[in-house]
Amino acid sequence: MADQEIAVGVDQLVELIINARRVVVFTGAGVSTESGIPDFRSPGGIWSRFDPDDFTLQKFMSSKESRRKQWRLMREGHVTEAKPNAAHLAVAEMHRLGKLDCVITQNIDGLHQKAGVPDDNVFELHGSNKWIKCMACGERYPYAQVKARLLEGEEIPECKACGGILKPEVVFFGESLPEDALEQASRHARHCDLFIVIGSSLVVYPAAQMPVYAVASGARLAIINLTPTLMDGQAEVVINGKAGEVMAEVITKLKAKLGG
Ligand code: NAD
């Protein structure tokens, strides 16, 4: 998309935000790539290095090799050491300006909260890697504790209490979504009047149902994503640009308008 088209889209989005009463921001892996966390599907993304099969609960539980790969990915620290980028900071600024109802995210990286959106305003549909849970006895460990064990050389950490399989509290394929987050996110999606998608291919269900709920309930839809999505045709504004760059522009213009 040419810079001129992006600038027009930004202006349109700022107007939509100013005129909206309840704005929901919905984010996917694309909002965090500028923080150095690869997404799944882009070139160089996680799917180009890992077999999607390794992200199924069944494979994780049944294959030591699959668990070894997962913990190696955790040890690399892409997710846990990442810092919020301009897009996360802009969304947090929307909160401070009273222009954000909530964030619904598919991400497990906690970067919206690190940027300053309160925990209560973030619904994590796919869990979070802040906690690691024993699949046998239910004991929970903070990620930092398990990371220390990884750095000491453990390849596949097991539960200290019972020796059971440890798994990050993130939703693997084949697992159901956390009921409470899903229920609350669906409610907020149905009650907003502006739904902004940032960095999601909108192909992972049931998360991708959220913009469908919003549009069906009469909300306006805006999409910021590098590549086209299946819902572009239903959006009032589509901006094919980088989330951080676009959102930095949006927030600068929004503050200028609100201040003036
Ligand atoms: P996806 O990988 O399917 O799609 C990401 C989209 O973001 C792509 O369409 C891509 O074009 C776009 N994109 C990439 N960089 C961008 C940028 N800088 N600005 C704007 N757009 C950009 O991701 P998804 O739809 O979120 O679904 C995949 C699943 O992967 C999710 O369930 C999520 O839980 C998980 N995931 C999470 C993280 C994370 O926590 N950061 C990272 C990888 C995958």
Image (cartoon, helix red, strand yellow):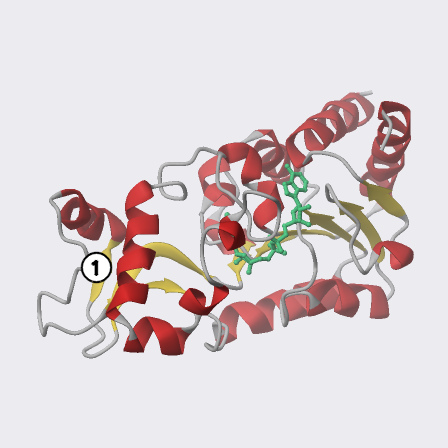
Q: Residue at x 82, y 59 (%)?
A: 231
Q: Residue 4, located in which quarter of the rendered image? A: top right
Examine the rendering and report whether any part of residue 236 can be seen.
yes
Instruction: Give the position of the C terminus as an image quadrant.
Output: top right
Using residue 9 as the reference point, say whether residue 184 is left or right of it.
Answer: left
Q: Amino acid at mark 1?
A: Tyr
User: In the rendering, at what x and y percent does residue 108 appear?
Assistant: 46, 54
Seen from the viewer's position, the closer of residues 104 and 232 is: 232
Q: Residue at x 83, y 35 (%)?
A: 14
User: In the rendering, at what x and y percent does residue 204 appear?
Assistant: 63, 65
- For residue 163, above or below residue 84: below
Examine the rendering and report whether any part of residue 217 can be seen.
no
Residues packed near mark 1 inside 10 Å, few (<14), some (14 to 19) or many (20 plus): some
Using residue 34 as the reference point, say whether residue 189 is left or right of it.
Answer: right
Q: Residue 247, located in which quarter of the rendered image? A: top right
Using residue 152 as the reference point, say whether residue 118 is left or right of it.
Answer: right
- For residue 60, above or below residue 198: below
Residue that numbered label 1 is attached to: 141
Q: Residue at x 87, y 64 (%)?
A: 218
